[in-house]
Image (spheres, rainbow, N blue to C red):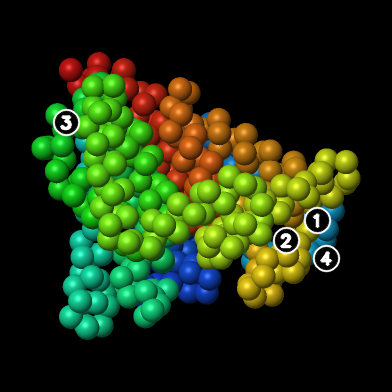
Amino acid sequence: MINGQKTAYFFLVLLILVLAVSPAFALGKDNRSLLLIGIMSLSPVLIIAFNKYHKTDLWIVVFMFSIILIPLLNQPRSMRWSTVLYSCMFCLCFMAYTRLLARSKLNPIKYLKILKVLILAYAITLLIQQFCVLFGLPIFNVSNYNETTPWKLNGLAAEPSHSARIVTLLMYSYIVIKEILLNGNYNLKKEFKNDIWIWIGFIWTMFTMGSGSAFLFLPLILFKTLKRKNIFPLILITISVFILINFLGIDQFNRTFNVVNAVITFDVDTIIAADHSASLRIIPFFVLITMLSLSTLDGWFGHGIDFVSSFMSDIIPGVTEGFSGGGLLQLFMEYGFVCFIIFTFGSILHLIKQNDRLSIVFWLLLILLNGMNSQILWLCSVLLFTNKYFLKFKKNYFNENP
C-alpha cells in the first residue's frame, strides 16, 4: 500500500487536469479524449495502491453492477461491452479520485491554485488562438473549427460550447473555495482587486470564444456574486453589457436569447427553428421525457443499449443516422429506471451541498443533461464533490488553521 502524500497529490492534480482539458492532439472518435482514457486506465491501480473504503464506493459499485447485469438479463442481444466498460472506467476514476483527495491532504489553498491555473490556461489558450486567426497563422490546439465562423474557438476543450460550460464550472468552484478561505460571502467589490486577472480571464473567455452557451452560463456566476449591497451596480453593468452586445450585433447572444425563448414554449419545432445546432442538445431530452414509463418491464430494466440511437434520427431532422442524446434520460431508456435512480440518487446525495442552490443548477445543466460517458459530467462530479468536501470540513479547517 502506498502512503506517499506527494504521489497521491500528483495523481489527483493529473485527474483534474485530464478531466478539465481536451487537447486537440489527443482527441479521438466523437471527441473522446484519448489522454483521459489513458489516465483513467490507471484507476484500478490507484484504487488498490491507495486502498481505503469511502462512503461513495457503495453507490458507485452498485451502479456499475447494475449497468452490467441488467442489460445482460433483460436485453442480452443489445449488450455492448465497449460502452459499458467505458462507463465503468469513469466510475473507477471517480473512486480513485475520492481516495486521492483524502490521501493527498489537499487543502483549500492548493485547490484554489489548481482552479486559478485552469481558468487562466483557458484564457491564454484562447488569446493565442485569436492571435493566430487575426494574423492568418495555423491555429494552436484547434478542434471542431469552422472557417465560416473564424472566431468561434475551442480553447482547451473539444469545442467552444464545452469551454463555456467548463470555465463557468471552474469559476463557480473558485468562488466557493474563496468563500471558505474568507470565512464569509464573496464580496465582488472587495475581492475584485485580488482576483482581477481571474475575472479578466474569465470574462474575456466567456465573451470572445464565440459560443452561445457562454451567454447562458455567464449569469450563473453573476447570481453567485449577487448580494443586496452590489445588486444595483450589477444591474447597471448587465444592462450596459446587453446594450453593447446588441449594438455590436453579436450573433451568439441573439441565438442564445432566441433558444431560451423557444425552450419556454416546450415546442420541438419552435426550438429547432430557433437554432438547429443548440436544439440537438435539448430536443432529445424533451423527446425522451414523453416516452418514459414504469408500467412495463423495459421501463424498469431498459430497452437495451443503443435503443435511443435507433429512432432519434427519425424524429430530429438534419442529423445522421445513429444520432443519440437525452442526458441521463438516455440512461433511463436504455438501462431502465433502476439504473437511473441509483445514479441520480447517489450523485445528488454525494455531490450537492444542502442549501447550495447553485450546485443544484450545475447538477441539472452538466449532469442531468449530459450522457453517462460525458467527460463534462464526470468533471462536474469531481469538482462538486471536492467543493462539498471542503464545505463539509470548513469548521475543522478553521480550527486547525486559525
From this viewpoint, which residue is outermost toward the left? Answer: 193
Residue pointed to by mark 3 = 189
Considering the numbered disc 1 on the image, is that residue within a helix, a strand or a loop? Answer: loop
The x, y position of residue 137, in whole percent, is 22, 83
Q: CA distance from mark 4 to mark 2?
A: 15 Å
Q: Is residue 279 left or right of residue 121?
A: right
Q: Nearer the viewer, mark 2 or mark 3?
A: 3
Circle 3: residue type: Lys
**Label 2: how many Cα within 10 Å (few below 14, some 14–19, many 20+):** many
Q: Secondary structure at mark 2?
A: helix
Q: In the visual, does 40 lie left or right of 167? A: right
Q: Are marks 3 and 1 in contact (CB under 8 Å)?
A: no
Q: Nearer the viewer, mark 4 or mark 2?
A: 2
Q: Tell whether 90 sits left or right of 270.
A: left
**What amino acid is found at the position of numbered circle 4 in the picture?**
Arg
- In primary-sequence order, the first of circles 1 and 4 is 4
Q: CA separation, marks 1 and 4?
A: 11 Å
What number of labels is visible? 4
Residue bearing the label numbered 4: 77
* Residue 266, horizontal then vertical, whole percent: 65, 48
Q: Which mark is residue 303?
A: 1
Q: Quick one: label 1 or label 2, which is nearer the N terminus? A: 1
Q: Which residue is mark 2?
A: 308
Circles 1 and 4, Cβ within 8 Å, touching? The answer is: no
Residue 319, disc? none
Please tell me how crowded label 1 is: few (under 14), some (14-19), or many (20+) other residues with Cα within 10 Å. many
Q: Residue at 28%, 49% (x, y): give it.
A: 243
Q: CA distance from mark 1 to mark 2?
A: 9 Å
Look at label 2 and name its amino acid: Val
Rate crowding at label 4 as few (under 14), some (14 to 19) or many (20 or more) other CA atoms within 10 Å.
few
Q: Is residue 90 visible?
A: no
